[in-house]
């Protein structure tokens, strides 16, 4: 048994540490419960927690809701009002995560500023007059590695005039 | 108050050494691949994205040289942590660099990144030189236990309360087909096997949702963690989220109490000796 009674050499120090530890762990438990409750909408947080929430472990939903359809984002460009052509964004900006390319994240589809930034990058590389971001959606097929594009639907998320300047962060470049 | 007499009683937990090494290795496993196309991901070379939850890009952005500097600090910190040199300073450097890079990137602050942040703080709460040699009050071990109880319970109960597809196995089979997280050969095959999906789905709900209560039963704790290990290995082979597996298993040695860990260590060591 490696659990031991309070250190006989430093009994007061041990008692003190146990007290501090108990308070610290109690606060940590309350923090976990609060973050769970706030995320479930049981109550409004007492303070503005937008900044703190990024660290909260309890906003981790971990594959709770399944998506019945695949969503792939495609970038297209055109010059002089000609036909839209697919742009090789994945070749120009190849960084990818388990969740796909940066623009595959749901937040990229929701935020106007993020779409502008990616569309402007597409302008820079393609020299097009206009670029656009298109979402391709199709149903998943069980048991197939190659997912056939059943009931394919497309939606233009945003069109961008390459002469415009995208909104950018205001931070100093270090 | 017999219970309180034993609460936070000093212990010598040899698992801290393994935790420290696993944490450093998992951080490297997560961050070394991110070094490929690093400048596009984390610096002004890629898309400059505004409106992060912390608004950090409205305060500062990383040029390529500043980005590589922060990345270098993180990798160096991992090296010194694994080697057992300046473990607390290493952990502070790792966690700080990890947070700065994750927030600068904006879109890919993953669940397991958040977990690695919290586990990094556990290194700061670990006794002595994080080598399992010092006897002290086990605040760090209980901190990790609360973290995992909360993490598993919240994700389990979100599934139980919010998604009926987890009760009939359909949610799991659909996840196996995700273009990015899924489409692994075993997972794709399994997605059609409802006889597999249903028990796996219920197993996930029982393990995750029941973890805090089951962990409290000391006798079944090692078996619970064995189920957890199989659960994460299952995810590793059936879904495309390897980093999640490394990040989740890092703290497992510390979820056993000191005595159980000692027994586990002895069993593993004697098994290896017999094999040789």
Image: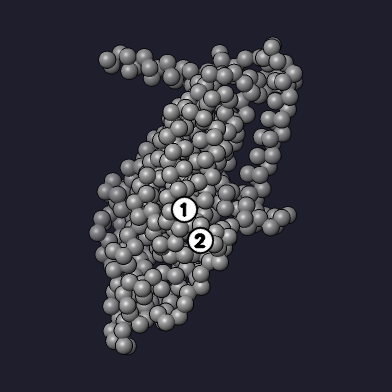
For disc 1, the neighbor class at 10 Å (few under 14, some 14 to 19, many from 20) is: some
- Please tell me which residue lies in front, B271 or A115: A115
The residue sitting at 48% across, 28% down in the picture is B85
CB under 8 Å between discs 2 and 1:
yes
Q: Are marks 2 and 1 on the same chain?
A: no
The residue sitting at 46% across, 43% down in the picture is B73
- Please tell me which residue lies in front, B43 or B132: B43
> Does residue A129 appear to the left or right of A19 in the view shown?
left
> Does residue B64 appear to the left or right of B122 in the view shown?
left
- Please tell me which residue lies in front, A66 or B6: B6
The residue sitting at 26% across, 48% down in the picture is B185
Rendered location of residue A53, percent (x, y): 60, 53
Instruction: Give the position of the N terminus of chain A as an image quadrant.
Output: top right
Rendered location of residue B32, percent (x, y): 37, 44
> Does residue A12 appear to the left or right of B62 in the view shown?
right
Residue bearing mark 2: A173
Rendered location of residue A80, percent (x, y): 31, 88
For disc 2, the neighbor class at 10 Å (few under 14, some 14 to 19, many from 20) is: some
Write down the chain letter for disc 2: A
In this view, the residue farthest toward the bottom is A81
In this view, the residue farthest toward the top is A8
Up-down relation of residue B168 to residue A124 (above or below): above
Query: Could you say which disc has been placed on residue B66 in the image?
Result: 1
Image quarter of residue A5: top right
Tag 2 secondary structure:
strand
Q: Is residue B10 visible?
A: yes
Q: Is residue B197 visible?
A: no
Write down the chain letter for disc 1: B
Up-down relation of residue A27 to residue A139 (above or below): above
Rendered location of residue A47, percent (x, y): 71, 55
Up-down relation of residue A22 to residue B263 (above or below): below
């Amino acid at each position: 048994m490696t659990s031991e009674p309070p250190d006989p050499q430093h009994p007061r120090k041990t008692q003190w540490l146990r007290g501090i530890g108990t308070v610290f762990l109690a606060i940590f438990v309350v923090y976990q419960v609060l973050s769970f409750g706030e995320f479930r909408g049981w109550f409004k947080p007492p303070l503005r927690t937008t900044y703190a929430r990024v660290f909260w472990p309890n906003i981790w939903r971990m594959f709770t809701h399944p998506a019945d359809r695949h969503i792939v984002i495609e970038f297209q460009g055109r010059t002089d009002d000609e036909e839209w052509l697919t742009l090789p964004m994945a070749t120009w900006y190849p960084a990818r995560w388990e969740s796909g390319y940066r623009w595959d994240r749901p937040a990229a589809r929701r935020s106007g500023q993020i779409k502008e930034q990616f569309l402007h990058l597409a302008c820079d590389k393609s020299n097009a007059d206009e670029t656009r971001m298109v979402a391709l959606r199709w149903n998943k097929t069980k048991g197939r590695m190659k997912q056939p594009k059943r009931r394919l639907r497309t939606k233009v998320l945003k069109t961008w005039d390459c002469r415009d300047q995208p909104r950018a962060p205001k931070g100093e470049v270090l | 108050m017999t219970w309180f007499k034993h609460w936070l009683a000093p212990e010598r937990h040899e698992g801290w050494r393994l935790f420290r090494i696993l944490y450093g290795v998992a951080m490297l496993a997560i961050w070394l691949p991110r070094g490929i196309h690093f400048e596009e991901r984390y610096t002004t070379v890629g898309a400059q994205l505004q409106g992060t939850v912390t608004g950090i890009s409205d305060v500062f952005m990383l040029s390529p040289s500043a980005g590589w500097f922060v990345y270098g600090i993180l990798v160096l910190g991992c090296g010194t942590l694994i080697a057992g040199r300046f473990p607390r300073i290493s952990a502070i450097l790792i966690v700080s660099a990890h947070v700065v890079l994750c927030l600068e990137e904006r879109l890919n602050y993953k669940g397991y990144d958040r977990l690695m942040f919290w586990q990094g703080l556990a290194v700061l709460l670990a006794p002595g030189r994080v080598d399992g040699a010092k006897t002290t009050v086990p605040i760090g071990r209980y901190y990790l236990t609360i973290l995992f109880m909360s993490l598993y319970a919240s994700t389990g109960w979100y599934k139980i309360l919010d998604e009926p597809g987890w009760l009939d196995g359909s949610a799991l089979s659909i996840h196996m087909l995700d273009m990015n997280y899924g489409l692994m050969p075993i997972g794709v095959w399994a997605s059609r096997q409802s006889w597999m999906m249903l028990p796996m789905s219920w197993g996930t709900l029982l393990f995750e949702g029941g973890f805090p209560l089951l962990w409290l039963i000391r006798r079944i704790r090692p078996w619970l963690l064995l189920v957890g290990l199989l659960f994460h290995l299952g995810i590793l082979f059936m879904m495309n989220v390897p980093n999640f597996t490394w990040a989740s298993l890092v703290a497992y040695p510390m979820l056993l109490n000191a005595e159980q860990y000692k027994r586990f260590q002895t069993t593993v060591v004697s098994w290896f000796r017999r094999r040789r």
